[in-house]
Image: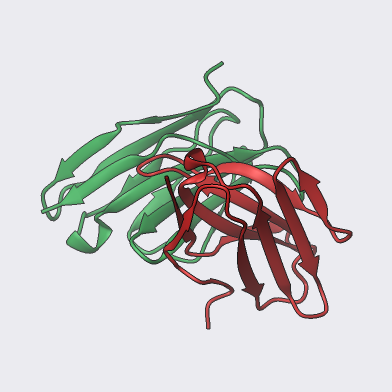
Amino acid sequence: RKEVEQDPGPFNVPEGATVAFNCTYSNSASQSFFWYRQDCRKEPKLLMSVYSSGNEDGRFTAQLNRASQYISLLIRDSKLSDSATYLCVVNLVVMDTGRRALTFGSGTRLQVQP
Amino acid sequence: NAGVTQTPKFQVLKTGQSMTLQCAQDMNHEYMSWYRQDPGMGLRLIHYSVGAGITDQGEVPNGYNVSRSTTEDFPLRLLSAAPSQTSVYFCASSPGGGTTEAFFGQGTRLTVV
């Protein structure tokens, strides 16, 4: 089983639509959570961190459910420029070794259409 | 404002050749890592380093070596290239701590024929 699982999509939505992506992670000791955005043939870039209480950044809302080991990203009023792959990322720190494992989901592709 | 710089951007190797992918960061970050990205697989951790002189294996280390002699540089060496190593390679760095953003280089597209 993958440590971080995402629906690969693609999600094809019209401009202005609301779209939600989900992600599940397998290690309950995971400590921090992120959504990254990756444009075609480019490097991943941080979209937003995900906090336990949920957080919002403009049209983007992230939620974390630790009990269900579930992370979500909601995009409201989709723009053409939102077309990209969205990567769910989980950071696990192993305290006795200091090892940090930034584990990526395989990504969900979003295509916003005019 | 360089951030994380990877070279080369593209490379074609013949099976059995060796090469080094370069990665340098100018943000004084402790933590650096190498990932490979294959279609449908997401990014997989190859090796990482929590500081100069310290390296450790990630999820898919076989066929790769790393060293960290300075804070700034973290080269990835392919010992004897194989077609299975055809991939896009990303180097990343982040400040200390487990809750911080990772900054990525622009990637190296490697093809092994």
Chain shaded red: A
The number of callouts visible is 0
As rendered, which of B58 and A26 lies closer to the eye? Answer: A26
Residue B27: % across, % down: 64, 25
From the viewer's perspective, is residue B54 above or below residue A8?
above
**Colouring method of the image:** by chain
- On the rendered structure, is B51 left or right of A56? left
Q: Residue at x 30, y 33 (%)?
A: B9
| Residue in the picture at 50% in, 71% down | A7
Image-quadrant location for residue A12: bottom left
Q: Residue furthest top?
A: B1
The colour of chain B is: green
Taking depth in this image into account, of B92 and B64 the one nearest to the observer is B92
Residue furthest to the right: A53
Residue B12 visible in image: yes
Q: Residue at image x 57%, y 48%?
A: A16
Residue A14 position, x and y percent, is 48, 53
Q: Residue at x 47, y 64 (%)?
A: A106
Q: Front-most of B106 and A13?
A: A13
Asked whether residue B44 appears in the rendered view, the answer is: no
Task: State the residue in front, B82 or A52.
Answer: A52
The C terminus of chain A lies in quadrant: top left
Q: Which x, y percent locates residue A25?
A: 65, 74
Left or right, A99 with respect to B12, comes to: right
Q: Is residue A64 left or right of residue A6?
A: right
Residue B87 in percent (x, y) is at 29, 53
